[in-house]
Amino acid sequence: MDTRLLWLALGGFAGALESFLLGSLLPGISADMGVTIGQVGLVVVVYALVHGFGTPVLTALFGGTDRRKLLGLAELTFAAAALCIALSPEFGWLFAARVALAVGAGLYTVTALATAVAMSPPERRGRAIGIVVSGQSLAVLAGVPLGALMATTFGWRSMYFVIAALGLMAATALLVRLPAGLSGDKKTLLERLGVVRVTGMPLALLTTFFCMVAAYMPLIYVAPLSLSAVAAGQATLPLILLANGIGGFAGSNLGGRIADRVGVRRALLLATGALVLITASIALVPYLPEGLRLAAFLMAMGLAGFVGWGFWPAQSSRIAGLAPGAAPLALALNGTALNAGVALSAAIGSFTIDNIGAWGIPFAGLPFAIAALFLALLFREKSGRQETAATP
């Protein structure tokens, strides 16, 4: 194994840790900054928008830059922004710093995957990508629960000092260890967006979008939702996040195997159908007998992690199959659809919490889960003949 890939994975670990941990930090940030939880949730909206729509633009602008320098600069930007968040004296400062953090994280993620491919022989590229992505799933499994526990003990700012240190460590290692001269592609933004015109692609991207709106809402607002659903305090959050992380780690490892065994179409239908049931079950948890609520909520959050991460390999396979000659560009747009879904999820959740209450979160997400299932069914009907013809 090329040990240099581990440093790429470390950068991914730091980014995923910050992104998935924020949901448990919302109450602490809200109390510290003197703003509502819904207002704090807006930093998720802007992060997702900058990450999703700014990354393709930045990738086009810096496509020909040496990847070692670009990765180092992106991760240094991420680390500096995390440090600014840790030291932020007011909410406006934090808001601006997370915009900068989104720029660094988005540019890093895309460039890291491309670099892993460039450094690996064709027969090992899949493994190389898997090693880099494993940093993200490891963050969800272990980093987020431990981070929530640390934040409960030492305060939310302590975790941003840790994240800044991880980012600085990764940036230093990448600048020292990666080879020079790995220049990226020089496709323009218009060339990248041309993938959208591929038959079936708009419907597939919409499926990703609606699925992510539903899947992320309980995770972004996990702290107020758990308090509303099972009266769980801040001390119980690490356990809830651990359940979600175990599910996510299992889903990221088994999702691709399930798609290979039952087929991509069935895997997508299973994932979106399960998402509908899980979202509805979270909505019903407060109505269960008190002694069953925590166990039911833990199970639902674990299954939500499994479905959310398990959906991704099947959908990525479908997206890449629609545009085999431009798979990296198609997958980048799929990432944009994901982040757009996260942005809308955070915005709707923010409005719901401030105007209805945290109990309304799963009810707000349920229509989007149903829409994702409907689009998965529609996609199957309209693209079956085309996919069969393209399979050879």
Image (tube, rainbow, N blue to C red):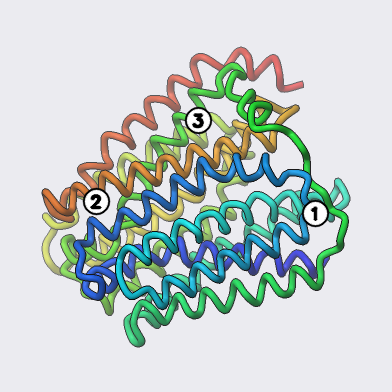
288 or 357, nearer to the observer = 357
Asked whether disc 2 touches disc 1, contact meaning CB atoms under 8 Å apart, the reply is no
- At x 74%, y 74%, the residue is 173
Assign the C terminus to one quadrant of the image: top right
Closer to the eye: label 3 or 2? 2
Q: Amino acid at mark 3?
A: Leu
Tell which residue pokes out farthest to the bottom in this image: 154
In space, the residues marked 2 and 1 are separated at their CA atoms by 40 Å
Place residue 269 in its image quadrant.
top left
In space, the residues marked 1 and 3 are separated at their CA atoms by 30 Å
- At x 64%, y 19%, the residue is 387
Closer to the eye: label 2 or 1? 1
The numbered disc on residue 350 is 2
In space, the residues marked 3 and 2 are separated at their CA atoms by 24 Å
First reached walking from the N terminus: tag 3 or tag 2: 3
| Pointer 3 residue | 205
Classed neighbour count for the residue bearing mark 3: other residues with Cα under 10 Å, few (<14), some (14–19), many (≥20): many
Q: Is residue 73 visible?
A: yes
The numbered disc on residue 66 is 1
335 or 107, nearer to the observer = 107
Classed neighbour count for the residue bearing mark 1: other residues with Cα under 10 Å, few (<14), some (14–19), many (≥20): some
- At x 36%, y 56%, the residue is 43
Q: Position of residue 184 (x, y in %)?
A: 78, 46
Q: Secondary structure at mark 1?
A: loop
Assign the N terminus to one quadrant of the image: bottom right
First reached walking from the N terminus: tag 1 or tag 3: 1
Q: Secondary structure at mark 2?
A: helix
Q: Amino acid at mark 2?
A: Ser
Q: Amino acid at mark 1?
A: Asp
Classed neighbour count for the residue bearing mark 2: other residues with Cα under 10 Å, few (<14), some (14–19), many (≥20): many
Q: Position of residue 340 (x, y in %)?
A: 43, 40
